[in-house]
């Protein structure tokens, strides 16, 4: 199963980064590819269900995910309970970085759910998901730092993919 991992150092304290990461309903306000995120159920402070609509390389993906939030670890795990992919699960995390900053991570394991085409489509989907994750993290950074990106600039991230 393909895995996409993207890490981004951000020069804000971990608690500040965590507050932005866990506020998924604000993602459409700062992330171009995220059309909507709605919390559809919240059983307690640590468990919620969210419905997502995200544009990915010209397609719109919809899914609902169950999330488990661990504020002490600054991590929330998710897994798709219904949606367009065969499997979609992972986590967001915020770790302290040297100098008082943070490293924000998004890790996703997925399967497109079409066994006969998986060998051909999973690598393409992994590239698209990696690019989308990098854009989401960069948008989160811009929101946290209160800066608009200069036209044509792209800050390199630290993407890693495990087959």
Image: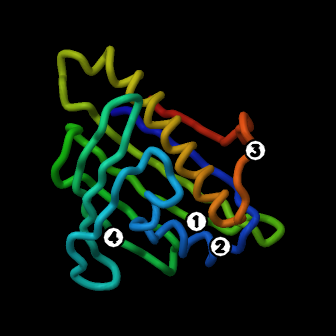
| Of 56 and 4, the residue lying toward us | 56
Q: Which residue is mark 4?
A: 68
First-in-chain label (4 vs 1)? 4
In the image, taking residue 108 as reference, residue 12 lies left or right, namely right
The image's mark for residue 14 is 2
Q: Which residue is mark 3?
A: 150
Instruction: Check disc 2: other Cα within 10 Å, few if <14, some if 14-19, many if 20+.
Output: many
Q: How far is mark 3 from mark 2, CA to CA?
A: 25 Å
Q: Secondary structure at mark 4?
A: strand
Q: Which residue is mark 1?
A: 94
Q: How many marks?
A: 4
Instruction: Check disc 4: other Cα within 10 Å, few if <14, some if 14-19, many if 20+.
Output: some
In percent of the image, x 46 and y 70: which residue is there? 22
Q: How far is mark 1 from mark 2, CA to CA?
A: 6 Å
In percent of the image, x 28 and y 75: which residue is there? 47
Q: How far is mark 4 from mark 2, CA to CA?
A: 19 Å
Q: Secondary structure at mark 1?
A: strand
First-in-chain label (3 vs 1)? 1
Q: Check contact, mark 4 vs mark 2: CB within 8 A.
A: no
Q: Is residue 69 above or below residue 111?
A: below
First-in-chain label (4 vs 2)? 2
Q: Check contact, mark 3 vs mark 1: CB within 8 A.
A: no
């Amino acid at each position: 199963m393909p895995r996409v991992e993207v890490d981004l150092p951000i020069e804000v304290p971990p608690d500040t980064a965590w507050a932005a990461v866990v506020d998924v309903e604000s993602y459409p306000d700062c992330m171009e590819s995220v059309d909507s995120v709605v919390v559809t159920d919240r059983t307690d402070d640590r468990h919620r269900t969210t419905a997502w609509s995200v544009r990915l390389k010209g397609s719109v993906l919809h899914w609902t995910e169950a999330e488990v939030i661990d504020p002490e670890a600054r991590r929330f795990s998710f897994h798709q309970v219904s949606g367009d992919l065969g499997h979609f699960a992972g986590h967001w995390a915020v770790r302290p970085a040297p100098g008082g900053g943070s490293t924000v991570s998004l890790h996703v394991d997925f399967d497109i759910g079409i066994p006969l085409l998986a060998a051909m489509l999973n690598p393409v989907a992994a590239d698209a998901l990696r690019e989308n994750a990098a854009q989401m993290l960069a948008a989160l950074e811009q929101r946290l730092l209160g800066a608009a990106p200069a036209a044509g600039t792209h800050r390199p991230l630290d993407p890693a993919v495990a087959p």
